Amino acid sequence: MSTEFTIDADWASQYIDGEFVPSESGETIDVEDPSTREIVTEVPAGVEADVDAAYEAAAEAQESWAEQPPARRAEVIQNLLGLLEEYEEEITSLLTHEVGGSPAMGQTSIQIATDHAGEAATLPRRMKGETAASNIPGKENRLYREPKGVVTVISPWNFPLNLSMRAVAPAIAAGNSVVLKPSTNSPITGGLLFAKLFEEAGLPEGVLNVVVGKGSEIGDRVASHPESDVVAFTGSTEVGRHVASLAGENLAVPAMELGGNNAHVVTGDADLDRAIDGAVFGSFVHQGQVCISINRHIVHESVYDEYVERLTERAEELPVGSAHDEGTVVGPIIDESQRDEMLDYVERTVEAGATLETGGETVDLEGVDDSLVVAPTVLSDVTMEMPAACNEHFGPIAPVIPFSTVDEAIELANDTEYGLSGSVHAGDLGVAEEIAHGMETGNVHINDQPINDEAHVPFSGIGASGVGGYNSDAFLDEVTETKWISVQTEPRDYPF
């Protein structure tokens, strides 16, 4: 298989036990460029036999990998860091072709992926044990941190590079082996690219295995495989509940980052320049296809009209078009089903009484039939019952909801089953902190927007936004076990 990192390279093989091999089915799946709607390459159509082979290889390779000294495991991740830098231009291009990522999205993805790999490189030396005093005379308690075994990673299509990296790299660094199943919409940048990168980084055979295929055909086998000890999944809440239930049948640990319906709260004394700067980025970066993007703008009634007017002006100024065009900010949605669903939310929200300030339609691209580009959309006069507000719309859509009191703002922010991220802008920092503490969500960012991810800071959602945690020691806890070994150094007295 070619080791090139371009869309024209050969991507039509699974990666199992250190070899690029065709799927047992012998069939492939087309990969479409969301900007041009053209087929740009093909990837394997995996079947359950491929899944079983991947887990067999992972299980066989894991023990010897775990026995490698910390310096060796860290060395592989350090090598990976160098490759991310070396192939930055090629990886950015792959993201553009595969998921419609603008150059800015690609660069951000690489930056965050590099941050996660850098943090992972420190984990082998942080897997330290400890001792604990015993209640039993003459006993010494020793605690050791050991890898779980085989970690399953099921990654999403929206930010496939960094969202795969944040699970794959720390799992491997901690001494586990990995079976990676990327989304069918991002099989390269979320999966097969990792096979090439880790192989070049010097990872031993079998420690990482990548199986590509349709979730409807192999997803259940991946999530429920008896060799799996941890299932790390990022995606929708609906699918995540199913994946977690399958993992639970084998008592595998679920680490789930699921959906979000994130609020951007703006008080009457907020700096509107900063609040709107954050709002534009938080709503429209990568077309709003971010689990932690702004889904709802909750704005005090005293500045509501000005906020809507200024947000609308900014939305209309954003460069919109093909992700291949330099300067594009808002590019294509990943596919027709996502596009049609979000436009339906907008249409039904307007029918329910909201005002369409701008957008709400597709943008034609020259030479492209059935464009996937959706114009940046602002909706005013929105209530929480309306479809664009009560659902995770996952698009470049900004519903703006008014509030009158701090308690009402908190109530509106919490009027959702999700609890992933959020943001607050307020002139009074004490009020901002009151709102932030009142928001029932795993992450809140004051005088910023909700899209933040730093590898050394724990990241988790609550409610329907997931279970378990990512980043730093939070994910290290998911992929390792604490083993208690006691040593009775003196004869012990027993009651009989």
Image (cartoon, rainbow, N blue to C red):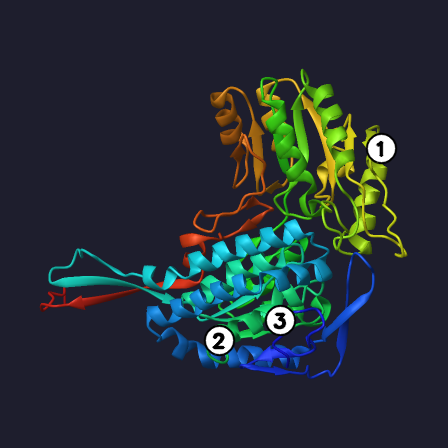
Which of pointers 1 and 2 indicates the residue nearer the eye? Answer: 2
Q: Amino acid at mark 2?
A: Val
Specify the amino acid type for callout 3: Leu
Instruction: Say whether marks 1 and 2 touch (CB < 8 Å).
Output: no
Which tag, 1 or 2, sits closer to the chain's start? Answer: 2
Q: Earlier in the sequence, mark 2 or mark 3?
A: 3
Q: Residues within 10 Å of mark 2 (few under 14, many from 20)?
A: many
Q: CA distance from mark 2 to mark 3?
A: 14 Å
Q: Between tags 3 and 1, which lies in front?
A: 3
Q: Can residue 2 be seen here? A: yes
Residue drawn at point x = 49 percent, y = 81 percent: 205
Indicate the amino acid at tag 1: Val
Residue at image coords 55%, 23% = 426
Residue wearing tag 3: 192
Q: Dot 2 lies on which element?
A: loop
Q: Farthest residue in the top direction?
A: 302
Residue of label 1: 350
Residue drawn at (73%, 32%) of the image: 314
Sort mark 1 into few (<14), some (14-19) or many (20+) by Cα contacts within 10 Å.
many
- Residue neighbourhood size for the residue with mark 3, other residues' Cα within 10 Å, grouped as few (<14), some (14–19), many (≥20): many
Q: Secondary structure at mark 3?
A: helix
Whether residue 251 appears in this view of the structure is no
Direction from residue 145 to residue 465 in the image, left or right: right
Q: Position of residue 138 (x, y in %)?
A: 11, 63
Residue 173: percent from left, percent from top: 42, 66
Marker count (numbered): 3
Residue 83 in percent (x, y) is at 52, 66
**Image coords of residue 188 (percent x, y):** 66, 67
Q: 444 or 12, which lies in front?
A: 12
Provide the residue designation for mark 2.
207
Dot 3 or dot 1, earlier in sequence = 3
Which numbered tag is attached to residue 365? none
